[in-house]
Every structure is written in C-alpha cells, then in structure tokens.
Image (spheres, helix red, strand yellow):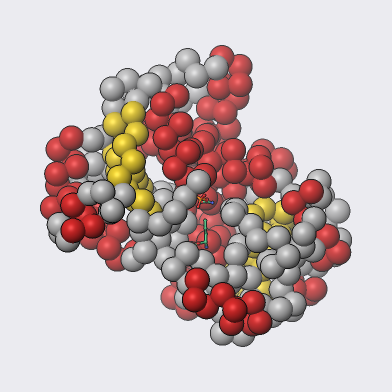
Amino acid sequence: MATRHFLTLLDLSPEESRYLIQRAISIKNGLKTHGPTYTPFANRTLAMIFEKSSTRTRVSFETAMAQFGGHALFLSPRDTQLGRGEPIGDTARVLAEMVDAVMIRTFSHQGLEEYAAASDVPVINALTDDYHPCQLLADIMTWTELRGSVRGRTAVWIGDGNNMCHSWINAARQFDFQLRICCPEGYEPRQDILEAAGDRVSILHDPQAAVENADLITTDVWASMGQEEEQARREADFAGFQVTETLLDRAADNALFLHCLPAHRGEEISETLLDDPRAVVWQEAGNRLHAQKALIEFLLLGRVEP
Ligand code: CP
Ligand code: NVA
C-alpha cells in the first residue's frame, strides 16, 4: 500500500476527515477516563524536524508519542546535516530506514512535498509558509466538541490570507461549512486555493459586516514567522482588523472564538479577548495533542473502530 502523507487537509477524504475528528474526541475521552493506558506505538519513533520555532506543536507531538508508548526525536537544522546542505531527499531516505513517521515544520511547502516524495514513511506537515493542517484538525475538533456538527455553519477568518487561512479554506471544503474571509486589500489568500473552494468561501473587507450572525470567528498574527521585517507595515495595513469583544457581539449568540496562538494582545486581538468566555483557545491548544494522536494512529495503523 502506498505511504499516506498529511501535507494538507486534502490528503484525507472528507469522510476520513470526519472520522479523524470523532476518533480524536474518543481518544481524548479515553485519556480522561483511563489515563495514558492506550499504547499502540511501543518502540515506534517519530522524527520531528523544526526549521521554525514552536511551543504547541513540539509539545503536543512529543507528548502524543510518549503517551502512546513511543518516542519522538527533536531535530533542528542547526544540529543536523540538513543545516549543512545534505539534500532533503537523502535525509528523507535515511530517516525512513530508522523511524516510523516524520513531522516537519519548515518554510517552503514545495520543499516539504519533495521530502515526502522521497519518504517511505508517513510525513506530516507541522506548518509551512502555505498551510498548517494539524492546527485545523484541533480547531474543527474544538468546534465540534462544543457545538456539534460544523456542516452548514458559518466561520469567519479575520486577518492575513496566510498559511492558517489557506488551511481554513481547505477545512471549509472538507467539512462543508461556509467561510467568510475578511482581510485588508492586498492580503487575500492565494487565488488557486480560493477558487478550488468554490462558493463555500467568500472574501470581504469589512469586519463589522463579516461577523454578522457568524457561528465562529478566528484570526491569527498579522506577521507570520519569516515576515518579521514586515511587522511595522502590516500593523498599519491591518488597522481596523482587530478582533474585540464588541466585534464578537455582532456574531451569533453562541459564537466561539479560536486563535491558533501565539497571540499578540493589542494587535490582532484586544488585550482582554482571551478572557472572554467565547474564546476557547486553551481547549483548542490542548486539542492539538488528541487530534495529532488520531492522525498518527490513522497514518500508521489505519482506522481503529471504537
Ligand atoms: N499553533 C501553533 O502551531 O503553535 P506553535 O507555533 O507554538 O507550535
Ligand atoms: N501564521 C502563523 C502561525 C503560527 C502557528 C505563522 O506562520 O507564524
């Protein structure tokens, strides 16, 4: 059987995606009830290549492997031959001889695709400049846990048309909900990703209008990793796009707020937004652990029926 990778949400079918969300919820409940007694990965190893900083992604993958009875290896270009120019394809072949799966956080999505093409073991995208699909598994899991099926609902993305925004577009396709993207002119998501989503996704430029009656609001930093030198210009361009409690008041009564974190209080969100009960970002962050357990289990073992 061909090796399954998870480079974008579209690597799973919509049906597999829904399975993964339910499986993640079930794994989370099992952990709460029985503790970390489910150990399907005894002696299995996940290699984690980080070319960008991380808190949540590293801790969730490493803890997932530990609780599953396996092991995770942290690899950074600074300390490996990747940083000294060993070709990515050679690294992929070598790691596949030793580990059971590889997780990569990097800049170029094309570089990730090249790595995956050379890898005989599953490769997981832990963020590229273009996508952050693991975060969306946790986000859809959180929304589902708190509000039931997301099918037919309306989410609003406020901010940059970045990697997270692209993954929200793919999520709208996979989980069949409406997505309004509200960004300043010139910060729209990639046209091809947008067009592929058809009429599930619309672009707006007025946050007040965008959030009207929405079921979920989400945002992200204005300058992503690798765009640090654009910070000042972006702060000016995104003025008026801050998510505040007052903005959320225009959404549906039971609307939720998500943020992948880290957040910049006083920039893309108000100083106090994360203290608002509609903000469920700590649960969202914690769900990275459970969603990624379901993902690794699926890639290595296939479906595990309850
Ligand atoms: N949301 C997220 O991926 O966080 P980290 O950058 O801390 O991994
Ligand atoms: N868009 C952000 C997400 C961080 C988790 C970045 O790429 O830096």
Q: Is residue 225 left or right of residue 106?
A: right
Q: Residue at x 82, y 66 (%)?
A: 247
Q: Residue at x 62, y 44 (%)?
A: 284
Above or below for 83 versus 303: below
Residue farthest toward the front in the current orientation of the protein: 79
Q: Taking 209 as reference, is 102 left or right?
A: left
Q: Residue 270's image quarter?
A: bottom right
Q: Residue at x 56, y 21 (%)?
A: 30
Q: Residue at x 59, y 54 (%)?
A: 262
Q: Is residue 268 above or below residue 174?
A: below
Q: Whole-percent x and y of residue 22?
A: 55, 35
Residue 8 showing in the rendered view: no
- Residue that protrudes farthest toward the bottom in the picture: 185
Give whichever of 196, 94 is nearer the camera: 94
Rendering coords of residue 255 (x, y %)? 78, 53
Based on the displayed image, in which of its 4 quarters is residue 1 positioned?
top left
Residue 304 in sight here:
yes
Q: How many marks?
A: 0
Report whether 239 appears left or right of 160: right
The image position of residue 43, as x and y in percent, is 28, 22
**Residue 99: percent from left, percent from top:** 23, 35
Where is 229 relative to 152, above or below?
below
